[in-house]
Image (cartoon, rainbow, N blue to C red):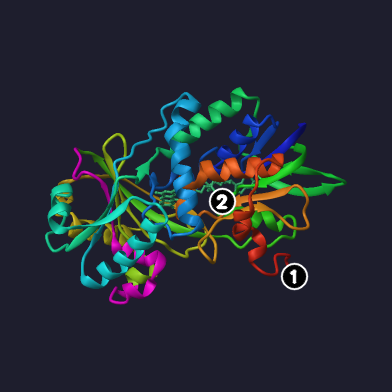
Amino acid sequence: MNLKKDVCVIGGGVMGLATAYYLLKAGKSVAILEKAEVGGGASSSCDDMILLQSKKPGIALTLAMESLEIYRGLSDELGADIGFYSHGGMIIIEDDIQLRVMEDFVRKQVSCGLDVEIVDRNTLFKKQPHVARYMIASTYSKSDSQVNPLMLMRALLHNGLKMGMDVFRNTPVLEIAQQGDHWKVKGQNDVEIECDNIVIAAGAWSAQVGGLLGLNIPIVPIKGQLAVTEQIAPIGETNCWTAAYIASKHDPSILSDRSDYDKKIGLGFSFTRAGEGNYLIGSTRENAGFDKTTNFKALSRILEQARGYFPIIDNVNIIRTMAGFRPGTKDGSPIIGAVDGFPGLFIAAGHEGDGVALSPITGKTVAEMICGAGEHKRFEELNLRRFSASVVEG
Ligand SMILES: Cc1cc2nc3c(=O)[nH]c(=O)nc-3n(C[C@H](O)[C@H](O)[C@H](O)COP(=O)(O)OP(=O)(O)OC[C@H]3O[C@@H](n4cnc5c(N)ncnc54)[C@H](O)[C@@H]3O)c2cc1C
């Protein structure tokens, strides 16, 4: 099958679907080529958080706050329930060292406009009656929100199809060729898309897609394992993380007393209640290539740790475990924007543990860039060119 489209999006995860949606809204014709099943990558093996409190002040926090604003109206816009809730979030603090790090972090976030505060033990225990009694304080933000990634992707797909989007499932991209001022993208099963623009939104696999063009896109898979509980009544008022989890992203030295195994698997803690009442308990940050297996030892550590923080879950059944590949970059920031030397080629990938949260702002921005609309100077710092030697040698 040979089609002519304005844009070919490579990858049918939350990022590809969001980008396609905003392109279609702007009047572009779009095809998505997806190597397996739509939404079958990281976007269906993850938590559901639009977590602002973990974001470094700067573009990461600004984009997360802007994405949250989009999310507030997205359900109405898409005409579908996307499982969006704002139950707030707390980062529980175990000791004085963590408290000092979090006080500094919170101060910086407040100066960027985030409504977050440090609360004392009494407030913590009121909001989290089942948390371990040795906790000394917590952060609290009522802005932390969540969205069901499966419902979101279904709604984006449904809206996209209504606007004429073509989606090719089980169609890995095999070849990409520049032909004069346009591109030809060849997928499996003789699918050929001629287009003016390409968006690489292949998550943890984006480096492989870049390789088809001799382009080095430095994104690697960072495996995360999760356990899912049966449906239960709320354990606390908000979702929870530990300061150590945030520190593992921003200040690894704070984890120096951890066992070698916990360090190896990048053990953190997240405890979030999905809309139907199942708790998602995570997670790990592992450099394990594309090995998607879950393993007993890592999951045991996740659950032992969760029992330490919330002893009540000892009585709760685990009904499912899963693993997914966060698309990670060296500096922890996504790669968003046009690619130098490849006119018409764009990247929307590398969002690591924030891709669900950042998909609306990323999709909207990349669509605007392609349409020549708006002004996007602040995205310069997220361009691929920040990584030197972007063309594969030899
Ligand atoms: C345990 C865990 C917890 C997480 N928690 C959160 C959270 O709470 N909040 C949050 O915001 N984010 C979270 N994330 C991160 C989030 O899941 C990702 O950032 C996001 O899903 C990435 O979306 P994506 O569309 O870029 O990638 P994916 O969803 O992986 O989609 C990429 C798609 O590209 C396709 N593809 C690959 N190669 C090709 C090819 N050659 N041709 C065609 N298609 C191709 C793949 O099949 C895949 O479907 C978490 C991740 C994990 C693993």
Residue at the location (65% across, 47% down)? 375
The amino acid type found where label 2 is placed reads Gly
Ligand 1 within 8 Å of the CB at mark 2: yes
Viewer-nearest residue: 35 or 374: 374
In the picture of the structure, the residue carrying the numbered disc 2 is 203
Per the image, label 2 sits on a secondary structure element best described as helix
Q: Mark 1 highlights which residue? A: 393
Q: Residue at x 59, y 29 (%)?
A: 160
> What is the number of callouts on the image?
2
Q: Which residues are magenta?
A: 233-260
Question: In the figure, is residue 76 to the left or right of 128?
Answer: right
Quadrant in which the N terminus appears: top right
Residue 344 in percent (x, y) is at: 75, 47
- SS at badge 1: loop
Q: Nearer the viewer, residue 150 or 85?
A: 85
The stretch drawn in magenta includes residue 77? no
Q: Mark 2 or mark 1: name the one nearer the start of the chain.
A: 2
